[in-house]
């Protein structure tokens, strides 16, 4: 099985990648289209030049790699994918080989988390509208990060049942530190996951944001709400 896990940034996406890697039967790939997207659009992200030098930046080659034999001869592949990385004209034929899952998180939490690491972007770099479009094009289970953190075993069990993958408690824990599959950008973004050995507990109240942050939340909410209506419960 090839699992295409779509989510915007700061959505619990790296922890989910670690969770699936911890199964032992699942190879993982970290944001394979990131370099191609940076090259195509010119976004000035942290470590931009290092990322471009480290990654394949031809979208056709990336797409081919997504459906190449799974590394290590493992039976499953987990692709951690950002919807906004699929720039106009990028190939989508590879997606026909995948089971699609859509990971979401409340915009207030995403904006607060993102803003703690760098200046706030435009809505397009949070992936909400693109994820909604991809969900309509490539439907699949929707899972909310809040539900995962509240009950990891229950939420992951429901997700695995939905996609036809046996659940295992191995998905709940992983060794502290990074993984060899981490993108080169891990040193900027992944400190929290590297310090963890499993999913953090339930989150507290939503952050109250105003100004540019509040406006960004309002822009994202219609897309989040539409996806949240379909989430696994």
Image (cartoon, rainbow, N blue to C red):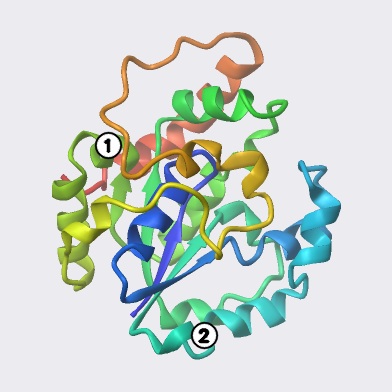
Q: Are marks 1 and 2 in contact (CB under 8 Å)?
A: no
Nearer to us in this view, 61 or 70: 70
Name the residue at 38% across, 17% down.
Answer: 206
Q: Helix, strand, or loop for circle 2?
A: loop
**Which circle, 1 or 2, is nearer the viewer?**
1
Instruction: Note whether 212 is above or below 133 in the view shown.
Output: above
Residue 231 vs residue 219: left or right? left
Residue 199 picture location, percent across and down: 31, 41
Nearer to us in this view, 200 or 96: 200
Residue 124 appears anywhere in the view? no
CA–CA distance between discs 1 and 2? 31 Å
| Rendering quarter of residue 77 | bottom left
Residue 31 picture location, percent across and down: 58, 60
Q: Which residue is identified by label 2?
A: 67
Name the residue at 57% across, 75% down.
Answer: 92
Q: Helix, strand, or loop for circle 1?
A: helix
| Rendering quarter of residue 187 | top right
Residue 84 picture location, percent across and down: 62, 52
Residue 215 picture location, percent across and down: 59, 18
Q: Which residue is identified by label 1?
A: 149
The quarter of the image holding the C terminus is top left
């Amino acid at each position: 099985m090839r699992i295409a896990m779509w989510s915007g940034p700061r959505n619990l996406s790296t922890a989910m990648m670690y969770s699936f890697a911890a199964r032992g039967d699942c190879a993982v790939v970290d944001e394979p289209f990131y370099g191609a997207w940076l090259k195509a659009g010119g976004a000035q992200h942290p470590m931009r030049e290092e990322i471009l030098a480290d990654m394949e930046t031809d979208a056709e080659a990336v797409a081919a790699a997504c459906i190449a034999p799974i590394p290590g001869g493992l039976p499953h592949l987990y692709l951690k994918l950002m919807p906004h990385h699929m720039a106009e004209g990028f190939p989508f034929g590879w997606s026909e080989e995948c089971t699609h899952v859509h990971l979401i998180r409340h915009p207030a939490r995403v904006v607060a988390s993102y803003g703690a690491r760098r200046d706030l972007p435009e809505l397009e770099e949070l992936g909400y509208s693109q994820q909604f479009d991809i969900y309509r094009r490539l439907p699949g289970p929707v899972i909310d990060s809040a539900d995962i953190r509240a009950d990891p075993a229950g939420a992951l069990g429901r997700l695995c049942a939905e996609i036809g993958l046996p659940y295992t408690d191995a998905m709940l824990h992983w060794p502290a530190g990074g993984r060899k599959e981490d993108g080169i950008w891990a040193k900027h973004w992944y400190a929290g996951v590297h310090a963890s050995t499993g999913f953090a507990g339930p989150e507290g109240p939503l952050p109250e944001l105003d100004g540019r942050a509040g406006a960004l939340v309002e822009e994202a909410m219609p897309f989040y709400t539409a996806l949240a209506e379909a989430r696994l419960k």
